[in-house]
Each structure stands twice: as structure tokens, then as C-alpha cells.
Amino acid sequence: MSNYEKPASSGKGIGGQAVIEGVMMRGKKMYSLAVRDPQKKIQIEKTPIGSTTAKYPFLKLPLIRGVVAFISSLVIGIKVTQRSAEMAGLDDVEYDQNSKFEMWLEKHFGDKLTDYIMIFSLVLSLALCIGIFSVLPTFISDFIVKPFGGGAVLRSITEGIVRIIIFICYLLIIAQMKDIKRTFMYHGAEHKTINCFENDKELTVENVKKQSRFHKRCGTSFLMLVMIVSMVVFFFVRTKIIWLRVLSRVLLLPVISGISYELIKWAGSHENKLVDIISAPGICMQLITTKEPDESMIEVAIASLKAVLEEEPEEKKA
């Protein structure tokens, strides 16, 4: 499961994501991908990050930067997940090189085939997310409230509750899958390693093991915050016409993502009771999406973070 990228200006500028048999750590200028291969060795790849905001400074504006960060992390998330599967040896499948469909793809797309597959994956992921977590709750809440003659306020509240229930059920279901369980363990290793780094402890397995597996800037926390912010926003955008409600939910997603990003960015760099309240729902969800890692997983997360720090040593002094 992909994590929403932690805001680079929070903490010490390091974010991360659990991938297949590994961890991706991201700095301001590059990200590193560490994966255990079939021979149980840790393979590391480093990739520079292009800065779109350097070209277009307006993309750094509050609210807008949240949408940019979300799309950027989604694109990188798909890339590193696909690459981690290759590095872990999970794509060693024999394909029929003479299949007509494969030959057609190669002929029409050539070297750009991988890029098109990634774009398709991105569009499909966004469509599924919007459909399951935005459009579906609108129809379900309408079905629940309509027989009781509920007004727009009741519809908005019911929709928000349904959206959160669907999200929790989704996490609980995928958490039962063997491969996802391991990914959630790597997710815990990622959090523990970042917490160790942010607490100025030496990056050793023993030090990392002592850290919390929860983090306020986790992608799970971001998604949970999106659910809560959407409840507030949609409370003020009310209509009984269902197609208008669906349209408003889709069109307002960038606004909701932007607001949620600013909130989680602020929460990640402050410590007070209000921050604890805002972070609490996301931390609760991390009880599902993070698990205690074993030492071999912690070693992978440490290797990934150290690879970033080698390229961005200024982060050590942040």
C-alpha cells in the first residue's frame, strides 16, 4: 500500500513508503529504493527527483502544493512499487514473446510502452479511489437516508460516516492478505527508522527497534484526514440532487487534498494537544497499516535512509 509522501519541510525532510520486500526513502532531491532480492541481499537504487515547482513557483502556494505533492507521490509510488517487484524477483514470469498482442504493443509504443503503462496505472488508481471513496458513499448515503425523508444535513453526515466505514473495511480486508501483511511490516520499519532519525539517534537496528511504529505524517493519517475534512467541506455543499452531489464531490477533491496536506504538514512540525487531537484518527488507522517489523526489514529501511543521507548530507544537520 502506497503512503502519501510526507511534506518535505516537516521534520527533517525525509519521507518514505513501504514497497514489495523493501522501503523507499525520499529526500528533497532524490529517493532511494532498498529491496531484498531472492538471494536475501539488499539491493539499492537511487533516483533524482525533478522539481516541477522550480519551473512553476505558483505550484508552491498553499493548497496548490498539496495537490502537487499528492500527484507526485502517487506517480513515484507506482514506479517504485513496480520496480520493487522486479528487484524482489516477483516478475520472473515466462511470457510468449510471439504473442500478437505483445507484438502490437511493441510496434505501436516502442520504448515508451513502460511510460504508457504507468500513466494507465495512475489513471486507473485515481478512478478507483474516486469511485470507491467518493462516488460510492454518495449513492449509499442517499439509499440509506431517502426512505426516512432526511434533509441535506443528514445526508452529508451519513455520507461522511459511510466513507470512513468503507475506508476502514478496505484496510481490514487487505490486511488479511499475506503479501500486504509483509508490506505493513515494512511500513512499520519505515516509520521506526524515520522516528529514530528524527530523534537524533544513531541508525542501528537496536535503536530503531525501540522507536514507535506510528508517525503523524503517515500516508494513512493523510487519507484519514481527507475523510474528516471532506465531511466538514461537504457539510456546507449541500443539495438533494444526487448527480450534483457526485459532481461536487469529484470537483472538490483537489481542495480537500490541499487543506488536508496543510493540516498534516502543520501537525508534523508541532507538538501540542490540538495536534494530538488532529493526529489521533490517523494514528488509530496505523494500528492496521503498520506492524512490528523483524530485524531484516529494519536493516532494509536503514539502508534506504542512509542512501538518501549520502546524497543529501545537509539533512543530517536539519
Image: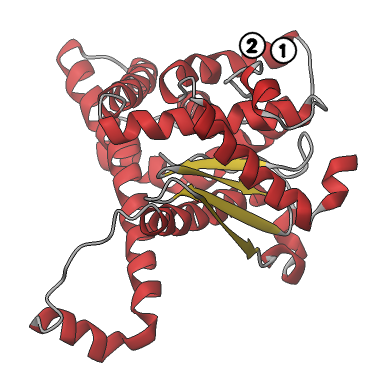
Task: Say what amino acid the circle numbered 1 marks.
Answer: Leu
Would residue 54 be found to the left or right of residue 224 on screen? right
What residue is shown at x 65% (from left), y 51% (from top)?
64
Give the colour scheme of this rendering.
secondary structure
Question: Which residue is under mark 1?
Answer: 274
In the current view of this chain or complex, which residue is farthest to the front? 39
Q: Secondary structure at mark 2?
A: helix
Q: Position of residue 180 (x, y in %)?
A: 33, 33
What residue is shown at x 26% (from left), y 61% (from top)?
92
Above or below, 221 relative to 22? above
Q: Secondary structure at mark 1?
A: helix
Above or below, 57 relative to 314? below
Within 10 Å of the Cα at label 2, are there few (<14), some (14-19), or many (20+) other Cα atoms? few
Q: Nearer the viewer, residue 158 or 293?
A: 293
Look at the numbered discs 1 and 2 and tell me whether their residues touch, using CB distance below 8 Å: yes
Residue 233 appears in the rendering: no
What residue is shown at x 66% (from left), y 18% (from top)?
211
Query: Can you tell which mark lies on residue 211?
Result: none
Q: Position of residue 161 (x, y in %)?
A: 36, 17
Residue 164 appears in the rendering: yes
Q: Position of residue 170 (x, y in %)?
A: 29, 27
Question: Which residue is under mark 2?
Answer: 277
Would residue 246 be found to the left or right of residue 42 on screen? left
Q: Quadrant of the N terminus?
A: top left
Would residue 295 be found to the left or right of residue 124 on screen? right
Q: Quadrant of the C terminus?
A: top right
